[in-house]
Amino acid sequence: MKIGTTKELKNHEYRVGMTPDNAAAFVADGHTVYVESKAGEGVGFTDEMYREAGAVVLDTPVEVFNQCDMIIKVKEPEPCEYEYLKDGQILFTYLHLAPNPGLGEALMNRGVKAVAYETITDEEGNLPCLRPMSQIAGRLSIQEGAKYLERSFGGRGILLGGVPGVERGKIVILGGGVAGTYAAKAAVGIDAQVTLLDINMNRLSYLEDVFGASVTTLYSTDANIKKCLQEADLVIGSVLIPGGKAPWLIRKEHLKLMKKGSVIVDIAIDQGGCCESSHVTTHDNPVFIEEGIVHYCVGNMPGAVPYTSTIALSNSTFKYARMMANIGFEAAVKKDAGLFNGVNIYNHHCTNKNVAKSLDLEYVDLNSLI
């Protein structure tokens, strides 16, 4: 198989879909690897490192797309890349289609086989390819939230860990999944007061066992959310419906309940956001203020730490890419039920129920197509 990766185009996105070690492994398996020049530059992977791994380095992304049977990326294609996609080509990347109908339409029209990292599951029903980025985003959410609580950024001027004689800052985390758990770890580590809400009582029981008295756990209801928002200095939104649009847990009218200068970090923004007032921001201009509340809604948070993110991501995704390369796409998705769940678009059909519902598309069972 001919396999390629290109330079990411999203604002301040320095990650790369394939490491030189990945390229070497593909070449050892008998495949041909194509890499766009400078694709790994942001991580410290030079063109020469890819050449030494056996890859062919090409000057432009269109050359890579034209050559390859499978494209491995990090983020979803930008609109200028849609025309590069071709019928029957495998696209393996984060897609986050729920809030992006234009991309969904393009993938359907181009006839690609689109596999989304964020909907691949493992034997326990977890999301192994989303997990490392959720871990990173969770930790970063506290780091970024603490920064934007500084007065110079429009925040309340709160030091989350406090000092002797001064009350510690209050952090509210909506969602106790991977991102929420790692946000809680980071929040506890700086000695903030932490409250975590979720609708899964088993998850809340587990988190109570893990964190003990360091974290207050609450069942997520509208009443509890409103109460917590009134007291919060920093709110982390980390809810997830795999493949689907995130629910709005924080409504615009809720902002009036919050302290002026408090901060919302909406980790769920790549799935539409869990705050009604959220809209995607970039690392160039990461925050905006509405109703006196600072919103941080960067859609590619882990891109800020590209070396860590790239290695962590490839550790999780490479085995699936290798399987598709070695035995073919259809054989791979039949063999691995988790990879099967990762297929969002297949030959002009939407094959993920949550994506189909979010984009108002007809859902087609992939089993009927392969």
Image (tube, rainbow, N blue to C red):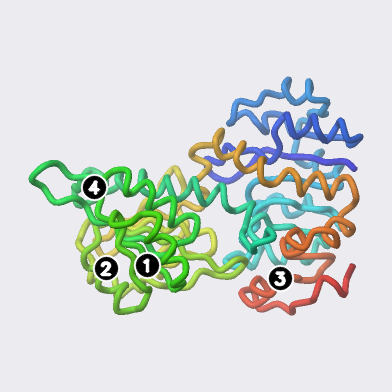
Q: Quadrant of the C terminus?
A: bottom right
Distance between the alpha carbons at the discs numbered 3 and 4:
41 Å
Residue type, numbered disc 1: Leu
Query: Which residue is at a point 67% across and 29% down the rendered structure image?
Result: 38
Element under label 2?
helix
In the rendered view, does 241 fall on the left or right side of 22?
left
* Residue 368 figure quarter: bottom right
Q: Are marks 1 and 4 in contact (CB under 8 Å)?
A: no
Please provide percent x and percent y for residue 53. 79, 25
Q: Nearer the viewer, residue 215 or 231?
A: 215
Identify the amino acid type marked 2.
Answer: Cys
Q: Position of residue 175 (x, y in %)?
A: 43, 64
- Disc 1 vs disc 3: Cβ atoms closer than 8 Å? no
Label 2, label 3: how far apart the Cα atoms are: 35 Å
Question: Depth-wise, is mark 1 or mark 2 nearer the camera?
Answer: 1
Examine the image and state in which quarter residue 172 appears: bottom left
Quadrant, the N terminus = top right
Residue on which the image places disc 4: 160
Cα distance in 3D space between marks 2 and 4:
16 Å
- Between 225 and 15, the one nearer to me in the picture: 225
Which is nearer the N-term, disc 1 or disc 2? 1
- The residue tagged with tag 4: helix, strand or loop? loop
Q: Disc 1, disc 2: CB below 8 Å? A: yes
On the image, numbered disc 1 is attached to which residue? 197
Identify residue for label 2: 228
Residue lying at 46% horizontally and 66% vertically, measured from the top left: 203
Q: Is residue 36 above or below residue 218?
A: above
**Number of the label disc, if any, that sits on residue 352:** 3
Q: Residues within 10 Å of mark 2 (few under 14, many from 20)?
A: many
Label 1 or label 3, whichever lies nearer to me, is: 1
Q: Is residue 6 visible?
A: yes
